[in-house]
Amino acid sequence: MTMDPTQCTHALNHQQNKSPAEKLGLKIRIARIMASYTQEKLAVRSGLSMAYIGMIERGEKNITILNCHKLAKALDITIGDLLDGVFDSEKTYCKHECRNC
């Protein structure tokens, strides 16, 4: 399955002030829905817990590259598909609330 970039781009256009974790979570949710998977089915396919997937989709958890790989594989897409458009190359991100360090 290939993600339709227009669907993700449209949703991400409204996420410009969101953190990379929130943007990535949205992309994972879109990919999951496009694959007609529930969070439960994605959890089984990826080996990750349903609660963890929910936190990722809501942007509440930072995801490791290994777990990103597990989700991409379970969704039959590449990590590149998931990460495309997540990071603003002109913006610096930090762990603080200001996000402007």
Image (cartoon, rainbow, N blue to C red):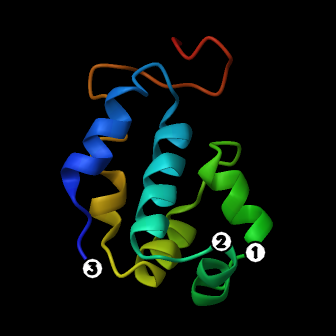
Contact check, label 2 and label 3, Cβ < 8 Å: no
Q: Which residue is identified by label 2? A: 39
Can residue 47 be seen at all in this image of the molecule? yes
Asked whether 38 or 68 is in front, the reply is 38
Kindly state the secondary structure of the residue where label 2 is placed: helix
**Separation of residues labelled 3 and 1 (CA atoms):** 23 Å
Viewer-proximal residue among 78 and 101? 78
- Say which label, 2 or 3, has the lower sequence index: 3
Task: Name the residue type under label 3.
Answer: Met
Q: Position of residue 11 (x, y in %)?
A: 37, 38
Q: Nearer the viewer, mark 1 or mark 2?
A: 2
Relative to residue 38, is residue 36 drawn left or right?
left
Residue appearing at x 53%, y 13% in the figure: 101
Residue under pointer 3? 1
Query: Which residue has dot 1 on it?
Result: 49
- The amino acid beneath tag 2 is Gln
Q: Can you tell which quarter of the image residue 77 is in?
A: bottom left
Instruction: Give the mark nearer the N terminus: 3 vs 1.
Output: 3
Question: Residue 51 versus residue 7: which sits nearer the camera?
Answer: 7
* Left or right position of 48 against 78: right
Picture coordinates of residue 58, whole percent (x, y): 65, 45
